[in-house]
Amino acid sequence: DTGVSQDPRHKITKRGQNVTFRCDPISEHNRLYWYRQTLGQGPEFLTYFQNEAQLEKSRLLSDRFSAERPKGSFSTLEIQRTEQGDSAMYLCASNLAGFYEQYFGPGTRLTVT
Amino acid sequence: GNSVTQMEGPVTLSEEAFLTINCTYTATGYPSLFWYVQYPGEGLQLLLKATKADDKGSNKGFEATYRKETTSFHLEKGSVQVSDSAVYFCALSDQGYGGSQGNLIFGKGTKLSVKP
């Protein structure tokens, strides 16, 4: 069991650039979640998938954010036209639908300069 | 909407001291409750959970009881160790698609430092 992995671990970008993050869940997990965590705060939900279907989206997920899970395995989170306020840790988690525990990846830390 | 409030830190204790981190929640329905821990440089890990009223979750000497009457899920440990130094997050499960367990709603976290 390799756990949830995220790539890259760190990303520094200039304001206005687009960035894409990848999450590989635990292989048998059909649910995948994205959260955002800013300094001194708890993680905030962004969106989640069951298989390839995006079931819920938070109001935090503005039009500049898009997430996909095309084959029900890995997922990507893209941020277009990044802003300094997007600087945060982006966390991915996965589980099996119906089970309570979510398994978190190490996160991708985004810094927008 | 649903929310979680936990005591602000940082909390600094001496080794072998008693720990309590308060957590209260607001929710419709009957959410499941969790404590997650984040050790320095590591990802979030589930510490313990409780899925219904009066359930007690326990792990690694930590305990928390789901109190519906006071909407609380306080974390306790009788004797903390230096290795318990971490950030602790209280969370509840929001109702998801079709009434199933959905995403987690977290408190702001409480940083615990244990001195030898």
Image (spheres, rainbow, N blue to C red):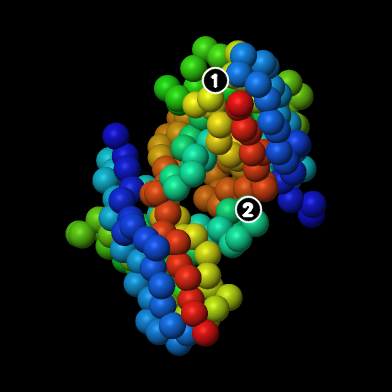
Along the line of sight, the residue nearer the viewer: B42 or B100: B42
Checking the image for residue A83, the label placed there is 1
A4 horizontally vs B32: left or right: right
Graded by Cα atoms within 10 Å as few (under 14), some (14 to 19) or many (20 or more), the crowding at tag 2 reads: some
- Residue at image point 76% right, 24% down: A71
Graded by Cα atoms within 10 Å as few (under 14), some (14 to 19) or many (20 or more), the crowding at tag 1 reads: some
- Residue at image point 39% right, 68% down: B11
The answer, for residue A47, to whether it is visible in the render is no
Subunit bearing disc 1: A
Return the residue found at the far bottom: B16
Amino acid at dot 1: Glu
In this figure, which residue is indicated by the disc labeled 2?
A: B43
Along the line of sight, the residue nearer the viewer: B63 or A15: A15
- Residue at image point 27% right, 46% down: B26
CA distance for labels 2 and 1:
25 Å
Subunit bearing disc 2: B
Return the residue found at the far left: B69
Along the line of sight, the residue nearer the viewer: A78 or A110: A110
